[in-house]
Image (cartoon, rainbow, N blue to C red):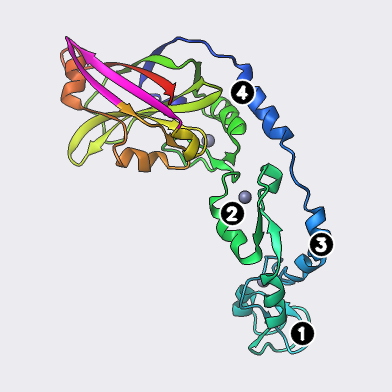
């Protein structure tokens, strides 16, 4: 399939020009975010030395209870304990000895989030750190390009550049759009043909997804918007999508979903403009042999 979804041809008219420079400004802001150095904390708690102690000597991962040790006192993480029968450091046979002192030390530590270099300033008790990192808003995003096995991750400016360069996704400036989807064989929905366009407005980026799929047994088209950022910021926006002809119109008003929610999840929740195929063909005004949908939309701040 050609980049950008291929099966659909498109024509776009974007209005309301916004500054391209807003994106680079955003990048600059992120780059300049003052990151609190962990030095003071490290000094206070002697973290650097203790942190090394909490690194498994065998696999170098951080150790969490139960932390084991060999009869000679070499420590070992729970995973390595399962794998080894002898101490990887001294080759002595491993018993079932816990290192409670080190577990207690770990409990008393506060550590910076692993995404500190990406801007997170949080400090967390040792055992809460992992839990936080799973939901940290500074953790990298995964590529929003749908239906691909793309495993690229990064911050938003990086992913915008990646979508453009590696997926040849169309980028448009403006908060209103007028998007034409043309498909020569509208009966073909099984392969979930789809396409993605990215809009720059209010200095943020929005992914407009359009695709064909089977909803149960009913062939439908669906258009929806995803926000390239956190959910709490996505909720600061609203959007409408409209499609129609001959005095009839389908209108969807919604809130963009964060790209933290997978494309698939948003699609399956039907949180967008769902157009039954029969209606889509009616709006296409042909003999039912070609899909020609004009989807108009607008994004605004609430
Ligand atoms: Zn280990
Ligand atoms: Zn040992
Ligand atoms: Zn964090
Ligand atoms: Zn990608």
Question: From mark 1 to mark 2, how far is it between C-alphas?
Answer: 31 Å
Q: How crowded is mark 3: few (under 14 residues within 10 Å), some or many (20 or more)?
A: few
Q: Residues within 10 Å of mark 2 (few under 14, many from 20)?
A: some
Taking the spot 52% from the left edge, 10% from the top edge, the residue there is 17
Q: Which mark is residue 165?
A: none
Mark found first going from the N terminus, 1 or 2: 1
Q: Mark 3 points at which residue?
A: 44
Taking the spot 68% from the left edge, 47% from the top edge, the residue there is 121
Between circles 1 and 3, the one closer to the viewer is 3
Residue 2: tell me if it is visible.
Answer: no
- In the rendered structure, the answer to whether residue 133 lies left or right of residue 13 reads right
Q: Which mark is residue 133?
A: 2
Q: How many labels does the image show?
A: 4
Q: Which mark is residue 23?
A: 4
Mark found first going from the N terminus, 4 or 1: 4
Q: Name the residue under label 1.
A: 73
Taking the spot 45% from the left edge, 25% from the top edge, the residue there is 4
- Name the element at disc 2: helix
- Name the element at disc 1: loop
| Whole-percent x, y for residue 110 in the image | 70, 62
Between circles 3 and 2, the one closer to the viewer is 3
| Whole-percent x, y for residue 28 in the image | 70, 28
Q: What stretch is highlighted in magenta?
A: 236-252
Mark found first going from the N terminus, 2 or 4: 4
Magenta segment's dominant SS is: strand
């Amino acid at each position: 399939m050609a980049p950008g979804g291929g099966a659909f041809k498109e024509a776009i008219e974007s209005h309301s020009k916004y500054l391209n420079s807003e994106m680079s400004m955003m990048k600059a802001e992120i780059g300049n975010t003052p990151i609190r150095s962990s030095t003071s904390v490290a000094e206070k708690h002697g973290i650097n030395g203790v942190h090394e102690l909490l690194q498994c000597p065998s696999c170098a991962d951080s150790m969490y209870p139960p932390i084991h040790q060999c009869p000679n006192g070499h420590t070992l993480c729970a995973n390595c304990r399962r794998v080894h029968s002898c101490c990887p450091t001294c080759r002595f046979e491993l018993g079932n000895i816990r290192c409670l002192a080190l577990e207690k030390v770990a409990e008393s530590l506060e550590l910076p989030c692993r995404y500190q270099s990406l801007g997170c300033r949080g400090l967390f008790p040792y055992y809460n750190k992992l839990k936080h990192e799973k939901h940290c808003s500074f953790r990298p995003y995964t590529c929003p390009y749908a239906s691909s096995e793309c495993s690229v991750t990064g911050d938003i400016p990086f992913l915008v550049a990646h979508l453009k360069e590696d997926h040849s996704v169309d980028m448009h400036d403006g908060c209103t759009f007028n998007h034409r989807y043309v498909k020569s064989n509208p009966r073909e929905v099984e392969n979930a043909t789809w396409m993605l366009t990215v809009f720059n407005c209010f200095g943020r980026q929005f992914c407009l997804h359009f695709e064909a799929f089977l909803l149960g047994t009913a062939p439908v088209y669906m258009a929806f918007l995803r926000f390239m950022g956190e959910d709490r910021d996505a909720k600061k926006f609203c959007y409408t999508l409209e499609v129609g002809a001959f005095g009839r119109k389908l209108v969807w008003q919604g809130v963009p979903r964060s790209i933290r929610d997978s494309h698939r999840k948003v699609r399956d929740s039907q949180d967008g403009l769902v157009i039954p195929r029969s209606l889509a063909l009616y709006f296409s005004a042909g003999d039912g042999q070609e899909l020609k949908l004009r989807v108009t939309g607008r994004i605004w701040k609430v």
